[in-house]
Each structure stands twice: as C-alpha cells, then as structure tokens.
Amino acid sequence: MSWTLLFSRLIDLLLPPLCLLCDEPVPDRATLCPDCWKKVQFISHPFCARCGTPFDFPVEDGTLCGSCLADPPPFAKARAAMVYDDASKRLVLNFKHGDRLHSAKALANWMSLAGADLLGGADALVPVPLHRRRLFARRYNQSAILAQQIGLASGKPVLVDALLRIRNTPQQKELKRKERKDNVHGAFAVPPEKKNDIGGKTLVLIDDVLTTGATAQECARTLLAEGAEAVHVLTLSRVKSFV
Ligand SMILES: [Zn+2]
Ligand SMILES: [Zn+2]
C-alpha cells in the first residue's frame, strides 16, 4: 500500500464522511445526505438528442430542440449530469474553492453515467483549459481533475495539453450571449506537437458547467478545425435552456 493511500485511509478513519453539499455526516464518503439528494436535479430523458436541453414533455428518441434545428452547434452531442441551479452551483463551488478534491470522484461518477453513450465511442478526453494566469490563481484546473477521474473510470486517455487557452478572457458570467461568443473567439489553440493526438479522433470535451455553450462551442470549433473527427461535450451541470 502506498503512503498516500495509507494516509487517505487514516484520514477516513479519523474524520467522519460529510455530505458533499451541506457537510452533514453521511454513511459513505463522496455522497450526498438524503435531503441534498432531493435538492439536486439530475437530468434524465427526455432531452434534445444533440445539445441535451431537457424537455418538459415526452418526445421520441432522436428529437432535436428548436435551437439545434435552427442553428446546429459545432459539437456532436452535449450531456450533463444535473441542472445548473443553487444546489449544483454549491457543489461546484465546494469543489473549486474548498480543496475538496475527494469530491471529484463522485462528480466524475455522475458525469460518467450521464455521458455513457458519448464515452463509449470516444478516443480521448480533453478538459476545457484555463489560462495559465487563472490556473496560477486557482492552483488547479477543475475540468482537468474531472477529466482525469472520468479517464480512470472509463479507461480513456486524457489529453491535458491538447487544447490551450491562448487568451485570458474576462469571466463569462458578466457577459451577454453575443458578448460571450465574441469574448472566446480565437481564445483556444492546439499546439503543433499535439495535432497528431487529435487528428481523426472522436473527443469528449470535459467542463464543470455549460451555460451559454459559447466556450464549449469555441473549443469544439478549434479541435475540429485542427482535424478532430467529432467533438462531444460532457459537463457536470448545465442551464435548463441556453440564455
Ligand atoms: Zn446534505
Ligand atoms: Zn438541442
């Protein structure tokens, strides 16, 4: 047994497992208490076959939403584990800022379930990159951590440096839809030495949240322009409909 494993077993013995959302004690590590299970809105059928937008009414398999019919996104399919709301926002915040890396396993597990059909046909996973200045401020890229956990569970390689953020863009959340699109335009690039890794490959982009989809679309466009065969998007949470 490695020292890290031994150490984490020791910590498990010393500290009671806590709910990932509210810090109430729970029987198992990396799970939610019964109350928080009810708060998180996991996404299940029916949803748009392309972008994963949940429908409020039953539809036939393969049905597309209005915006995918009118203006198909560059990515092949997008899937998310849960709706982006107060509960999932808190889960992501706890994960991002609280050094709760052990929660990565649980989050990645929910994502793997939601994205099972994308992962099945994928060649590799690509985390949405942070600019190195923001990476420095935050110390780690949560998308890369989620991708690594999903990679471990699915056996798919993770191409951590296949996509770089070459421009440090202002935070998307303060911008309107059109501004967000302009904001990320040309923000990503594939380094020349990584082009062979993505050429002809079916890739799954990994991120924590899908809001307008502008970042995911720009990443997909960049990877496709550099020769990727297809790009899917798998996120922990997503808005109920794109704003
Ligand atoms: Zn709880
Ligand atoms: Zn759609």
Image (cartoon, helix red, strand yellow):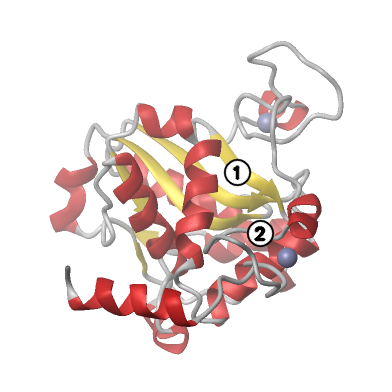
Q: Is mark 2 within 8 Å of ligand 1?
A: yes
* As drawn, 56 above or below 156: above
Residue 185 is situated, as x and y percent measured from the top left of the image, at: 51, 59
Helix, strand or loop status at disc 2: loop
Is residue 207 in sight in this rendering?
A: no
Residue 167 is situated, as x and y percent measured from the top left of the image, at: 43, 73
What is the distance, in whole Å, between disc 2 and disc 1 at their CAs?
A: 18 Å
Q: Which disc number belongs to residue 80?
A: 1
Q: Quadrant of ligand 2?
A: top right
Residue at point 63% right, 15% down?
Answer: 62
Residue at point 35% right, 27% down?
Answer: 121
Amino acid type assigned to the residue bearing label 2 in the image: Leu
CA neighbours of label 1 inside 10 A, class few (<14), some (14 to 19), many (20+): many
- Residue that extends furthest to the right in the rendered view of this protein: 57
Quarter holding the N terminus is bottom left
Residue 11 is situated, as x and y percent measured from the top left of the image, at: 41, 80
* As drawn, 82 above or below 88: above
Q: Can you tell which of label 2 and label 1 is closer to the viewer?
A: 2
Task: Tell me the residue that label 2 is attached to.
Answer: 32
Is residue 177 in sight in this rendering?
A: yes
Residue 237 is situated, as x and y percent measured from the top left of the image, at: 64, 52
How many discs mark residues in the rendered view?
A: 2
